[in-house]
């Protein structure tokens, strides 16, 4: 069995979610139908809504089920931008952290290109934390022109937890709504929607032991949102489309299980992660831990850059050794590009190319960390050799033969 | 793996032979196009996905390796520079020499691999001492040994061509179908991969400064004007727009391009026939035959284009001094029957039977008739 150290990408389905999902898949019924089958499905969805709301410190009416985190992000960012601008055409500014997931980043860029949004990318420090002074400055510059602020709860690459409460504290006096992508945070660290003061918050099912293809947007009861997807008027008329009862029920079951056990699991994973970090540092002393330390970091996240190594070489070699990790960043057509998160944290392209992310979750054990630490030194030294390759070829080619012939004579 | 049928079947055969195989797709551009259009271009996202899908079916890992910077420098820029110098390069050969069997191979070796396996139609033979020879594929119509003629012995030691003995391309397609590879009926790619619309002239015109100059005949008399010497190829007949007709009224052809003087030389068809080729940047595909060291002349066949016919020739190696006084080996190839369509920059590959001996870049192509003028 390969060792799975990529829980930030997706997690194994939890036993609770699997049981609920298979039960619901065997049943029929559209939650919008008024007959018996419909009522039964509706019951399952509404139970799930209450369960999920309780797990995230929200009211059930604040839960809008979506197809996943990406849809929730799109809905929040576009929906808030449009409704706020409709109320006041001056509101075209979006303040967005420079380290967002592409689901937010690309949505904001789309609004910039197609809807005339005026985007401010909020800088981060070398730990990847948004600089509050910069946010304060941007708000003070022209608070009346800001449509929304969007800053993720925790970063998917380096695991840094953002000061969400402080951010809301700066925006709220001006009535500016704040959205946060909490896809990585929810189920890993305590997340309380009501206490956070956020206007909107995105979460996803498959990052916490639920199924892929379901997520939710928590949306404050008084927050107005322009819909992105039109149709049958489900979910407060904000997100039309037949509700996926089995996925929604399984998502809620997974969320309930994970939050019930959050404190213990957080302690367990933090300790396991710290052992992983110490082990990597001992095995490869030049490796650099990226992201924030201690409480400001997701319990399951360890992210390093390995100087001289290409992240994709390292990933390949670890995969070959049965350890599944990630470079942490998305790629274009499979072409690895340096991570925008690491560049925003001040790394140069060469350093950023050496990134490797190890993320732990509910299925992770000490044996997984042992397997990584065993495979890592060899993988690193090979990746370093491969990183050197292709600059000045050591393979004899027709060109080098010709050069050697002329220099020998 | 390009995403085409040949490399997919080559990978399948390597897997079946019991090797540990990993599929690698070369990213030769940082901004690949999304979809293929016909048989032109390559390395689109669709091609990458096709290669990926083939790997899924074969149950092997798949990776994209980014060699776009190296490719731009060693292949694309070389292509532009060669045209700017009035020569006719072969970018596929350059890519094999410097990317697929050099940069890629070197990275692969560092990562613990032993060989690069491709879907080229060519054959590697190993003797009892482990020395390798490069040979034509069983299907001479599909044979691609020409574009591999630039490989050195060391490169051949790390090369595998599982399609070597395949009787025909149709067979490869049928095999792909049998193996459930969705690329079985994907069209072959043609043309130069980095010129997506196939318009080489137009593409070059954007990269090279074109200035009008004279077209002269074989005696040096001006017979017309051209929009830029680099837009012409040796052997070209159309598009010359000559004002002054030839004395004998017969069509005239491009004989030579002189980039330094920005002149194009034209003349009668007979003067296109080349009798002697001198090649530089000589390399041997495997161990050189004995005559190479002694400088003795040997019988062989010469081929100057990927799909050209091999013609009988005699060849020998000469050590000469170049313009700056540096000694270098030159390959002198005397063609038994004069050959048309030979231009500086092209590669001459020498064969004995099916065996590839080696290659050189054509530096000069001499017509005895023209020398006599």
Image (tube, coloured by chain):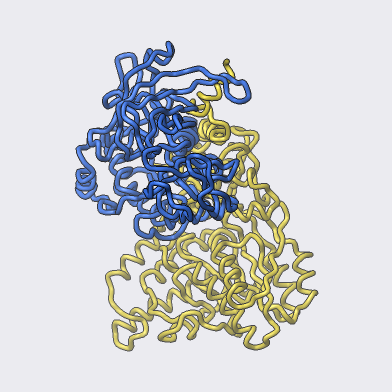
- Look at the picture and state if B287 lies above or below A384: above
The hue of chain A in the figure is: yellow
Lateral position of residue A336 relative to residue A41, left or right: right
Q: Considering depth in this image, is A374 or A388 the residue closer to the camera?
A: A388
Lateral position of residue A5 relative to residue A178, left or right: left
Image quadrant where one finds the N terminus of chain A: top left
Q: Is residue A366 visible?
A: no
Q: Residue at x 46, y 80 (%)?
A: A229
Image quadrant where one finds the C terminus of chain A: top right
Q: Position of residue A381 (x, y in %)?
A: 55, 31
- Look at the picture and state if A342 lies above or below B359: below
Which quarter of the figure has residue A114?
A: bottom right
Q: Position of residue A363 (x, y in %)?
A: 45, 50
- Look at the picture and state if B330 lies above or below A127: above
Which quarter of the figure has residue A285?
A: top right
Q: Position of residue B215 (x, y in %)?
A: 52, 48
Q: Considering depth in this image, is B240 or B187 the residue closer to the camera?
A: B240
Q: Residue at x 69, y 53 (%)?
A: A345
Q: Residue at x 30, y 69 (%)?
A: A25
Q: Position of residue A20 (x, y in %)?
A: 36, 66
User: Which residue sits furthest front?
Assistant: B247
Chain painted blue = B
Q: Considering depth in this image, is A104 or B283 the residue closer to the camera?
A: B283
Q: Is residue A12 visible?
A: yes
């Amino acid at each position: 069995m390969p060792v799975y150290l990529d829980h930030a990408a997706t997690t194994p389905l939890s036993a609770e979610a699997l049981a609920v999902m298979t039960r619901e898949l065997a049943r029929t019924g559209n939650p919008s139908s008024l007959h018996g089958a419909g009522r039964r499905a509706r019951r399952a969805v509404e139970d799930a809504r209450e369960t999920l709301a309780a797990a995230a410190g929200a009211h059930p009416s604040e839960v809008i089920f979506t197809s996943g985190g990406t849809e929730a992000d799109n809905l929040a960012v576009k929906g808030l931008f449009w409704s706020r601008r409709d109320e006041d055409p001056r509101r075209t500014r979006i303040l967005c952290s420079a380290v967002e997931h592409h689901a937010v980043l690309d949505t904001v860029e789309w609004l910039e290109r197609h809807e005339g949004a005026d985007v401010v990318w909020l800088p981060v420090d070398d730990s990847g934390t948004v600089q509050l002074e910069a946010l304060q400055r941007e708000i003070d510059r022209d608070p009346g022109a800001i449509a929304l602020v969007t800053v993720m709860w925790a970063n998917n690459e380096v695991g840094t937890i953002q000061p969400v409460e402080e951010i809301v504290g700066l925006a709220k006096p001006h009535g500016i709504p704040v959205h946060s992508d909490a896809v990585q945070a929810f189920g890993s660290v305590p997340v309380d929607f009501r206490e956070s003061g956020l206007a909107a918050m995105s979460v996803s099912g498959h990052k916490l032991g639920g199924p892929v293809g379901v997520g939710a947007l928590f949306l404050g009861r008084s927050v107005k949102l322009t819909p992105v997807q039109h149709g049958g008027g489900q979910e407060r008329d904000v997100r039309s489309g037949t509700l996926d009862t089995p996925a929604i029920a399984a998502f809620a079951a997974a969320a309930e299980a994970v939050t019930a056990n959050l404190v213990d699991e957080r302690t367990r994973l933090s300790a396991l992660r710290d052992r992983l970090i110490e082990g990597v540092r001992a095995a490869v002393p030049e490796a650099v831990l990226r992201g924030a330390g201690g409480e400001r970091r997701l319990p399951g996240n360890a992210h390093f850059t390995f100087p001289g190594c290409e992240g994709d070489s390292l990933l390949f070699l670890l995969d070959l050794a049965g350890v599944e990790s990630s470079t942490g960043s998305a790629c274009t057509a499979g072409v690895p590009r340096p991570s925008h998160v690491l560049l925003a944290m001040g790394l140069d392209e060469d350093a950023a190319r050496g990134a490797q992310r190890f993320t732990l979750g509910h299925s992770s054990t000490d044996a997984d960390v042992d397997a990584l630490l065993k495979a890592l030194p060899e993988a690193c030294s090979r990746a370093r050799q491969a990183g050197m390759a292709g600059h000045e070829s050591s393979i004899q080619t027709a060109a080098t033969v010709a050069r050697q012939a002329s220099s020998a004579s | 793996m390009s995403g085409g049928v040949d490399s997919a079947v080559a990978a399948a055969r390597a897997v079946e032979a019991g090797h540990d195989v990993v599929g690698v797709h070369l990213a030769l551009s940082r901004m690949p196009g999304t979809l293929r259009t016909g048989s032109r271009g390559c390395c689109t996202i669709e091609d990458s996905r096709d290669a990926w899908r083939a790997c899924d079916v074969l149950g092997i890992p798949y990776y994209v390796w980014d060699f776009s910077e190296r490719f731009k420098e060693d292949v694309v820029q070389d292509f532009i520079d060669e045209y700017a110098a009035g020569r006719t390069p072969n970018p596929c050969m350059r890519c094999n020499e410097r990317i697929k069997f050099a940069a890629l191979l070197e990275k692969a070796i560092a990562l613990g691999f032993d060989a690069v396996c491709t879907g080229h139609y060519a054959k590697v033979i190993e003797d009892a001492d482990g020395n390798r020879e490069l040979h034509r594929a069983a299907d001479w119509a599909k044979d691609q040994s020409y574009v591999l003629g630039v490989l050195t012995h060391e490169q051949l030691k790390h090369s595998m061509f599982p399609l070597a003995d395949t009787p025909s391309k149709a067979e490869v397609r049928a095999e792909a179908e049998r193996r459930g590879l969705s690329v079985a009926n994907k069209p072959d790619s043609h043309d130069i991969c980095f010129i997506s619309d196939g318009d080489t002239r137009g593409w070059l015109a954007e990269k090279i400064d074109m200035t009008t100059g004279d077209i002269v005949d074989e005696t040096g008399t001006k017979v017309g004007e051209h929009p830029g010497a680099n837009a012409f190829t040796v052997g070209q007949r159309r598009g010359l727009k000559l004002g002054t007709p030839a004395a004998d009224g017969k069509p005239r052809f491009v004989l030579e391009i002189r980039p330094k003087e920005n002149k194009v030389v034209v003349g009668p068809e007979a003067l296109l026939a080349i009798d002697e080729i001198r090649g530089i940047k000589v390399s041997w595909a495997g161990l050189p035959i004995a005559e190479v060291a002694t400088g003795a002349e040997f019988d062989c066949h010469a081929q100057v284009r990927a799909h050209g016919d091999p013609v009988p020739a005699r060849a020998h190696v000469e050590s000469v001094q170049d313009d700056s006084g540096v000694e270098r080996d030159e390959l002198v190839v005397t063609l038994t029957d004069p050959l048309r369509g030979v231009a500086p920059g092209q590669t001459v590959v020498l064969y004995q039977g099916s065996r590839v001996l080696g290659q050189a870049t054509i530096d000069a192509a001499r017509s005895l008739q023209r020398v006599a003028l």
